[in-house]
Image: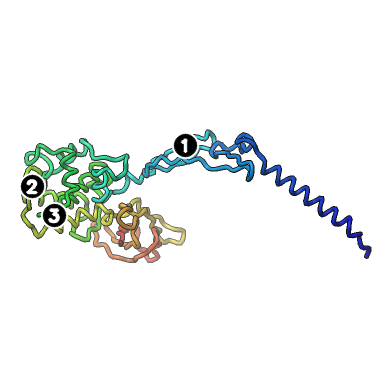
């Protein structure tokens, strides 16, 4: 084998190295951001004479946790799309307290419309017992730290009223209560409202407005519990339950988990119980408990089967 002289080899290596250095130097050299234009309207083009060009994504954050923020690659304009996180799930008492104190979502506030809704739907908050309900009074009750009578239950009831007023939950929503045997939000709301109203824990008296201690009542904790579990999302059923038959004859169930206030606990349940009946009136029999948001019923027999799915927190 013929050996090439060593010097020419070194000269070639040096030439390759010089070309590589020249390319690197050319890439790193810029004098203004115009030299770094990448044709992407969603990036900010920067020039550093030493390190070269850099391209940073535009900051489209609007500071609103209720929206998904993005950049339109065609125009470079920021787009803020309602994520549904602030309208589709209930908010806990703590959220409404922060709103009243001015430390919550800056996009949210208790309004006169909320007060009007409460007056129209509640014995406790409406006439003839109360004609002086205001935003200021609602927030004073929500943020009061002095414990008396049924004050805790009253605060949770006000939070539930606000969630209903905003459409975060509805009276017809089904629940799986751990506190009572109620099966709908309407039942729990009415139960708590009647108790607070009948015990004269009214805004014009001393109990709710904070003027003095209310009369202790052993049922206060029950109504506090049933309102709180709805406010937190813990009692709500799953959404969008769909049942379809697979090619092998099994029935496939799929659903959307209930959403709670992620500020206070895990946003979704850990497991789900599957119930089956042959009529809509039941009786329902539990057939499985799963962690996923779908289930295949391999033992389904009959053409008319009814299913229900309840979350386990």
Question: Is 274 located above or below residue 26 in the figure?
Answer: below
Residue at 41% over, 57% down: 245
Query: Which quadrant would the C terminus be assigned to in this image?
Result: bottom left
Residue at 33% over, 44% down: 86
Discs 1, 2 touching: Cβ within 8 Å? no
Can residue 126 be seen here?
A: yes
Q: Residues within 10 Å of mark 2 (few under 14, many from 20)?
A: few
Question: Is 231 located above or below residue 136 in the figure?
Answer: below
Can residue 307 be seen here?
A: no
- Circle 3 sits on which residue? 147
Q: How far across and down, in percent of the image, does residue 180 sit?
A: 18, 59
Question: Which element carries disc 2, helix, strand or loop?
Answer: loop
Most foreground residue, 132 or 213: 213
- Circle 2 sits on which residue? 211
Compute the Cα span from label 3 to label 2.
12 Å
Residue at 71% over, 44% down: 25
* Dot 3 or dot 1, earlier in sequence: 1
Most foreground residue, 154 or 269: 154
User: Outermost residue toward the right?
Assistant: 2
Q: Residues within 10 Å of mark 1 (few under 14, many from 20)?
A: some
- Circle 1 sits on which residue? 78
């Amino acid at each position: 084998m013929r050996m090439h002289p060593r010097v020419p080899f070194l000269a070639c290596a040096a030439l390759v190295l010089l070309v590589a250095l020249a390319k690197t130097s050319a890439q790193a050299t810029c004098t203004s951001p115009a030299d770094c234009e990448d044709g992407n309207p969603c990036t900010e083009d920067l020039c550093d004479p030493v390190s070269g060009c850099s391209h940073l994504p535009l900051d489209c954050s609007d500071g609103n946790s209720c929206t998904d923020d993005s950049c339109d690659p065609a125009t470079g304009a920021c787009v803020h799309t309602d994520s549904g996180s602030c309208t589709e799930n209930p908010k806990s008492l703590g959220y409404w307290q922060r709103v009243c104190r001015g430390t919550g979502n800056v996009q949210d506030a208790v309004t006169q419309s909320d007060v009007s809704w409460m007056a129209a739907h509640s014995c406790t908050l409406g006439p003839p017992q109360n004609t002086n309900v205001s935003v200021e009074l609602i927030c004073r009750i929500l943020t009061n730290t002095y414990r008396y009578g049924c004050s805790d239950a009253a605060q949770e009831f006000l939070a539930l009223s606000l969630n209903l007023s905003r459409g975060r939950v509805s009276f017809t929503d089904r629940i799986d209560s751990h506190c009572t045997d109620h099966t709908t939000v309407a039942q729990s709301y009415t139960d708590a409202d009647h108790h607070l109203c009948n015990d004269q824990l009214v805004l014009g008296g001393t109990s709710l407005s904070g003027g003095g201690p209310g009369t202790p009542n052993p049922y206060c904790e029950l109504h506090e519990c049933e309102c709180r579990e709805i406010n937190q999302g813990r009692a709500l059923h799953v959404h969008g339950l769909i049942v379809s038959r697979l090619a092998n004859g099994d029935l496939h169930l799929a659903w959307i988990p209930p959403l709670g206030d992620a500020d206070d606990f895990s946003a979704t349940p850990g497991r789900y119980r599957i119930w089956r009946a042959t009529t809509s009136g039941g009786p329902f029999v539990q057939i499985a408990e799963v962690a996923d948001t779908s289930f295949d019923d391999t033992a389904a027999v009959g053409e008319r089967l009814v299913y229900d799915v309840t979350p386990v927190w």
